[in-house]
Amino acid sequence: MSTLIMIDQPPYGSWSGREALDMAFSLAAFDQPASLLFTGAGVTWLKRAQDTAGIAQKSVERNLSAAPIFGIEAILADRSACQKYGLDESSLITGVTLVDANGALLEQYDHTAFAG
Amino acid sequence: MSDTSETFTLVITGAPYSSQAPQTALGFAKAAIDAGHSIDRIFLYGDGVHLASALCTPPSDETRWPQEWADFLEQHSIPGIACIASALRRGLVNDTEQKRYQLPAANLLHPFEIAGLGEWVEGRMTSTRTLYFHAGG
Amino acid sequence: MSSFDTLHILNKSPEHPRAAQCLALLSKGDALLLTENGVLLLSAGRLPAVGKVFALSPDVSARGLGNPVGDVTVVEFGDMVSLSLQAQRVISW
């Protein structure tokens, strides 16, 4: 049973993205196939060089780079949202696959969920 | 009544009194039971954990959603689980966590329990459907 | 035996970014169930052209939208339960 966890909220301003990541890690820990899909403003999670020292939060960049090690199958990002937020291959963290977030993509998963 | 009996896991991520999520979820849960289905478990995640607070005290002419849910869970022997990481971050603790972190009080409403995300993974694997009740907006 | 590919449950008002996202992803063969603030789509007059549209009765009534016009079926919680089982998958937006 494959699961797609969707993140459409940007990091730091709310906790829902972090909690979405915990859901994906938890699935992977139980050997359940899980992928992450970033859409809308959520794609800004994937920006390189996030310096969070001034807001006393852990950088999500490090969380995300650990995703493949924890068994997350894919980190997907909606192509048009990346364009909207000025993200291209040089500004995205490594390991991100650009996709078109449409009905055909969702049909590839048995289960799709947001964290909040 | 349906021909076949199915099982549901319901995940509530919207808090009472800041979202309609717990009410919509309760309406769904009651209808599922009425149709002869069963609820495997309720999993409270993110802000949804506030539903398990024993200290919610709305004005007397408003519905006490935590109590409504607690009564429903007891009546049908359905486990209600609050995610431990979400709960501790938001100040929802049981006796065990109160002792572990030496906190001044515990506030988990009976019969809710506190456990990890594994409960969600398991519910999702064993239920026919897992439905999410998020905050609206 | 599924009647729908995906049941999309939308509880966000039409102005919410996730409402736009949900409507953009609706495919032929899908169903859309409007709940909570999602039912405001009925008065905003922007019902999607594809898929079958349902709206949850108590939320429709609460917002003063009884007897909505257009191609929408007003349903009860019991129907919401059956709809969730009739679809191959359910997405709560």
Image: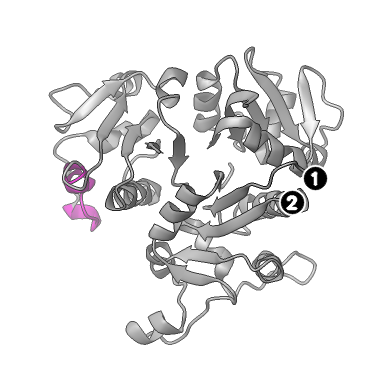
- Using the image as rendered, state which of residue B35 and residue B15 is in the foreground: B35
Q: Which mark is residue B10?
A: none
Provide the chain ID for the residue under circle 2.
Answer: B
The disc labelled 2 sits on which kind of residue? Gly
- Find residue A36 and report its image quarter: top left
- Circle 1 SS class: loop
Residue position marked by numbered label 1 in the rendering: B1
- Circle 2 SS class: loop
Q: Which mark is residue B36?
A: 2
Provide the chain ID for the residue under circle 1.
Answer: B
Outermost residue toward the front in this view = B3
Asked whether, in this view, residue C83 is left or right of residue A97, the answer is right
- Residues drawn in magenta: A53-67
The disc labelled 1 sits on which kind of residue? Met
Q: Is residue A56 magenta?
A: yes
Q: Is residue B74 magenta?
A: no
